Amino acid sequence: MNVLVLNSGSSSLKFQLIATDLDRIQRNEDARLLRGEVERIGGEAIVTLGKSNGAHQTLTAPLRDISAALDFVIRWITSDKSGLSEVRGPADVHAVGHRVVHGGERFSESVIITDDVLKGIEECIELAPLHNPNNIKGILAVRSLFGAGLPQVAVFDTAFHHSLPEHAYLYAIPYHLYRRHRIRRYGFHGTSHRYVAYRFRVLRNVTREQTHVITFHLGNGCSAAAIRNGDPVDTSMGMTPLEGLVMGTRSGDLDPAIVNLISAKEGLSAHEVEALLNTQSGLLGISGLTNDMRVLQAELKEHDDRRARVAIEVFCYRARKYVGAFLAAMGGADGIVFTGGIGENSPEIRAQICGGLEWAGLTIDPERNKKMVGKEGIISSEGSQLAAYAIPTDEELLIARDTVRCILGEPHPS
Ligand code: AMP
């Protein structure tokens, strides 16, 4: 089955075309065919296209909305230019899997998109006003281009965290606010946490029920999940992706009274303060330089920049605190996994987070850690009680697999 995986943002559309079926999933032999991205939709868009394991071309095109961007991508996929013999026309795209950010309390797993499901995704707009509307636009664009006959599946960022117990998801605010407005912790990056937890159990040769692991997704957005018996029992992100770890531009946890204080002192509205906490804070806010970890590390190395150093220190310290908190929350774990742009690629940050965790039975092997850049493998030392791994995430693969399983009515074991 050729599955088109789509991630529709406010001005961007990312896609992958993956050929997979139950047999290929079983053998872990899904074929990644094409990938690409359209950025700056709404004006002169920048389009990057190519074979998944080959060279990419970049071009520009005036694309006014997601529908136009998708039309452009489909034409390219089905033309000679893609160099793909498997896909000759739209009929050779057999299904579409969408990343949908918020599934609220209703969606605990991936589902085939019906009118009723679409309505459910619409009802979650108030929980994710910046994301769900774009995801819906992507779904509608596929419907109008391919017709309603093409199966579409929604894979939710929140779904994996559905197992959070009440004591982990409730905020200690008046209960009627939860009942009236569904104010609670939902958690995000669920597909990424689920994927790396699945890879962890494959690498450790244990069952889903035997999977006790803390997963760190450290990219521009950052979150951690405490996974016990294969299911999350806690996670760092909350009602929105602002809570939890320090991120590229987001503050993560802070005293809520600060919002009013910044508002009064700086003459900003509550909305503006929220935007400041989402877009001007985190690594960027502390360093005053950038949200990009690689650049911060270079600044530290080349210029011994004090604020770059302290930004990195706060980032690592706060992540380390979550290791301790989650070990307590889940009654101990067998391992820690690092993923996301920083988690997959920065041995220095991994070592800094894990530094001083020997009391918890974790020792990093410097040689193993150094080697594991952009690839999957163990980074802790032989005798480490708590194993540590770097595992590149692959949300698109999981979306493609869920799409196939949903269409064939199979359960989602990972
Ligand atoms: P993501 O959102 O997963 O694409 O991750 C983006 C973040 O990963 C940015 O802060 C990048 O600087 C960071 N990153 C990517 N490669 C590296 C690297 N080799 N070393 C440190 N950080 C990296």
Image (cartoon, helix red, strand yellow):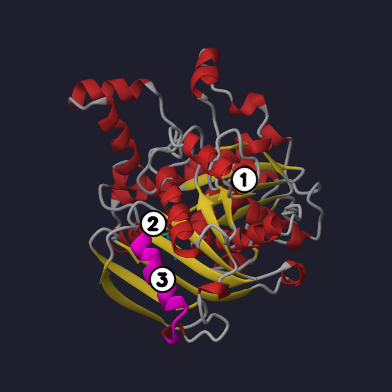
Residue 210 is left or right of residue 16, and the answer is right
| Residue under numbered circle 1 | 357
Tag 3 and tag 2, C-beta contact below 8 Å = no
| Distance Cα–Cα, label 1 vs label 2 | 23 Å
- Residue 68 is inside the magenta segment: yes
Query: What stretch of residues is rendered in magenta?
Result: 67-80
Task: Give the answer, above or below, for where 26 lies relative to 165.
Answer: below
Residue 371 is left or right of residue 59, and the answer is right
The amino acid pointed to by label 1 is: Leu
Task: Give the answer, above or below, for where 404 lies relative to 413.
Answer: below
Q: Secondary structure at mark 2?
A: helix
Tag 1 and tag 3, C-beta contact below 8 Å = no
Q: Secondary structure at mark 1?
A: loop
The amino acid pointed to by label 2 is: Met
Q: Position of residue 156 (x, y in %)?
A: 56, 47
The amino acid pointed to by label 3 is: Val
| Residue under numbered circle 2 | 293
